[in-house]
Amino acid sequence: MNALSPVLTPRELVGDAPPSPAGPLDPAEAAAFPGPPEITLPRTLQILRFNQRQIEFVFRARRELGEVFRMRGTVDDSPVITSHPDHVQSLFTAKPELAPSLTGESPLRPIVGPNSVLTAIGPRHMRQRKLLLPPFHGEAIERYAQMIADAAEREIDRWPVGRPFALAPRMQAITLDVIMAGIFGIEGRPRRGTPEHGLRTATKNLINASTLPAAQLVELMNIGRDEPVGIAKVGLAMLDRPTYRVIAQRRATDDLGERRDILSLLLQARTEDGEALTDQEMRDELLTLVLAGHETTANQLAWTWERLVRAPAAYERLRDAVRFGDADASAAAVETTILESMRSRPVIPIIGRRVKVPWRLGAFAVPADTPVTMSILLVHHREDVYPDPYAFRPERWDDNKPGTYTWIPFGGGIRRCLGAALAMAEQRVVLETMARRLDLEADDPEPERAVHRNVTMIPSRGARVIRRR
Ligand code: HEM
């Protein structure tokens, strides 16, 4: 049985997806369309269910209300949720001023400030994105492959044999090493007492703390603010100190031009007007990359294994290709497994834009200033796009490329994940290394539930497995 099937069986999903026109309307045109149907539960209950049981919540709403519906959320106004690829396309390709990203209003804003590439909108966002893009290009990322492989091999050597353990924290140890090396140029485990050691420890602590249930409260307290309050403020101060020290130290080195890490590249980066980033901007961007890139990639890898150990055919196909196939066969099996994992368990299940003019969404229209969100989870489980959507079948990708508006785990348009190439490289190297070196099995045949931590959806038991000798 599949983790999602108790909520909704494939039979109940829509059939063929007829085209569904979407995009900006003028107010007179918009008046001709009704608003989307609304979920009628009390607001607090909706927020609670959305935060704790998003899968059940959105699948049920879709079953009862259709592919566009409206809920009451934590932002003052009520977000609309859609899952039609045409609606997704209208939002991804819209002029940025017509549909700015909702991440500007996200709980990360008080942590990374209003001006980082994640939280800024408009010209400021474009400026930061241009500055950050070069080190995240595919070619630049290829240089990291060996470093990622080293981090994975080192970590795997420590794993127990014959008794159950959770993969998610082990994956986080690898992605933390990758972030520290790729972003800060800190290779291996730094020495105690150095700013690098302080930075690694504080980052780990902040991320661990952010996954505690109490963090949800902290998150709610911080929504809509530019500065953190309460415990988040204390945690951040502990991270800021070593971060600024590492920045200052790096600014002073004389081999800056030869270094390939992102911090060194950013220190040399200039805008079109010849401006350099200030220390504060540097800190905001670095922290954004750490927070956006570490837990996401780790949990996506954990989900891949949570699925693989419960899908014997898929696991065998991968293991055979990696161990006995040629380089092409191995790479293809790894790639299709990742595509299928990100389809069936997208670690970020929902993203959004705020439409600044009335917007058509098929048979409905919403007024200007409505938050319109796209449920990645629902798009990825459309039966018309993905036959047998609840099955984990990497082979569905053998002759199919992921669609720009139907496979959207990294979002899209000018807000598409900046770290996608790095995240893919990490997943490829770690998955290949693990499939080659290890024989893993589930400690329990029951699938793990999805639970929600901040903006991510993670396996409830951290993807527990047993390593066979
Ligand atoms: C499997 C791992 C990852 C997943 C699933 C993921 C997913 C996403 C998604 C869904 C968005 C929002 C896109 C949108 O609204 O259209 C996003 C944005 C972003 N991600 Fe990732 N991400 C991952 C890894 C990373 C990594 C490794 C980094 C960097 C080190 C990173 C940095 C960013 C940044 C900076 C943004 C904001 C981009 C912008 O607004 O212009 N992510 N990511």
Image (tube, helix red, strand yellow):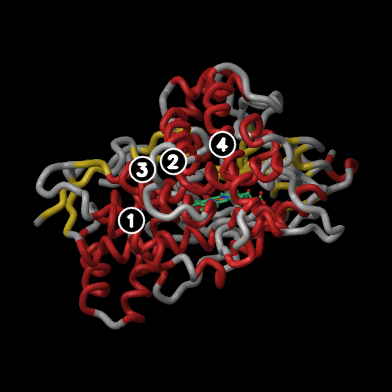
Q: Please identify, in this view, whether the residue under mark 1 or under mark 2 is nearer the observer.
A: 2
Whole-percent x and y of residue 308? 27, 56
Splitting the image into 4 quarters, where does residue 3 fall? top left
| Residue under numbered circle 4 | 65
Whole-percent x and y of residue 205? 43, 32
Q: Earlier in the sequence, mark 3 or mark 1?
A: 3
Whole-percent x and y of residue 349? 50, 44
Image quadrant occupied by the C terminus: bottom left
> Which residue appears at 48% of the width and 26% of the height?
49
Q: Residues within 10 Å of mark 1 (few under 14, many from 20)?
A: some
| Residue under numbered circle 1 | 391
Give amino acid for label 3: Leu
Which is more toward the observer, 60 or 64? 60
Q: Earlier in the sequence, mark 1 or mark 2?
A: 2
> Which residue appears at 40% of the width and 48% of the height?
298
| Residue under numbered circle 3 | 4
Q: Earlier in the sequence, mark 4 or mark 1?
A: 4
Give amino acid for label 2: His
- Secondary structure beneath label 1: loop
Which is more toward the observer, 328 or 409? 328
Give amino acid for label 1: Ala
Q: Earlier in the sequence, mark 3 or mark 4?
A: 3
- Secondary structure beneath label 2: helix
Which is more toward the observer, 357 or 95? 95
Asked if the residues shown at circle 4 and circle 1 are in contact, with their CB atoms under 8 angstroms apart, the answer is no
Disc 3 and disc 1: Cα gap in Å? 10 Å
Which is more toward the observer, 35 or 122? 122
Q: Visible in this render: residue 89?
A: no
Asked if the residues shown at circle 1 and circle 2 are in contact, with their CB atoms under 8 angstroms apart, the answer is no
- Secondary structure beneath label 3: loop
Q: Visible in this render: residue 324?
A: yes
